[in-house]
Amino acid sequence: MEKTHKPGVAPQKASARPAGAVKSGPAEITERILDCAREVLVRQGYTGFTVRAVAEAAGISPGNLAYHFPSKQYLLRAVVEHMVAGYATQFEELLTNTKLSPDQGLKSLTQWLLADAVTEESVRTFRELWAISLHDDVVREAIDDLYNDLMSGVLELLQRSYPDVELQTLQEVVQILALFSEGSIVLYGTCKDRVVPHDQMIKLVLRLLDLHAPELGSDAQK
């Protein structure tokens, strides 16, 4: 996904990563490192997130890992960027699926996003990253970029699907989804047994979207 400024989203700060901090290498090795790094973060937390632990999980030497990612900070930032790419692909698949109307695509995205938010992997990953970002500027900027990038990407896709809908309305829809997604992690991440079940909250969010932006509903597409 492009790192350029998109309409309706605040420009991002320049990355804190120094030039040449991450050296390129075989794509499959980099992919394996990033997948294993997230797994280590999820299972062992930040205290267990060490270069040695990630290297061992990826089946490579610490020196080889350091060739690609010279510090734990920049490895974490790369993990976040890797997550952005994965989410962006999923969003595009849902919102550009030619078998679905734009309204169906948006509802599918909403359901997927809120369901994914309460998975163990998402809950552990984001809670760890939130905690780290309070004490680490590199990770904080990476998290800020993650939200900016993902909201920008969804906004861009919605603009394609709803060219006649006002930009502000689309921006509000994107931020409603972001708020409910992140709120789901907080409220349901470690306590599934709430007075109002999460499945019911997803249905409520879908109704709220219809009320807030009726022009995005299926009737408007006929």
Image: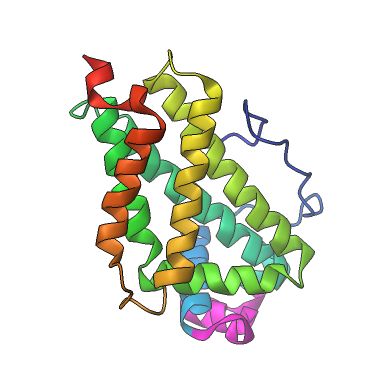
Between 91 and 115, the one lying in front of the other is 115
Residue 139: percent from the left, percent from the top? 70, 63
Q: Residue furthest left?
A: 99
Residue 221: percent from the left, percent from the top? 26, 17
Specify whether residue 11 is in view. yes
Q: Name the colouring of the figure.
A: rainbow
Q: Quadrant of residue 74?
A: bottom right
Between 77 and 208, the one lying in front of the other is 208
Magenta span dominant secondary structure: helix
Q: Residue at x 44, y 18 (%)?
A: 165
User: Within the magenta stretch, is there residue 45?
Assistant: yes
Q: Residue at x 31, y 44 (%)?
A: 206
Q: Residue at x 31, y 50 (%)?
A: 204
**The magenta segment:** 44-63
Between 98 and 210, the one lying in front of the other is 210
Side of 72 relative to 159 (left or right): right
Give the number of marks.
Answer: 0
Specify whether residue 109 is in view. no
Q: Residue at x 28, y 18 (%)?
A: 220
Placement of 60 over or under 90, stated as above or below = below
Between 43 and 202, the one lying in front of the other is 202
Residue 207: percent from the left, percent from the top? 30, 42
Side of 57 relative to 73 (left or right): left
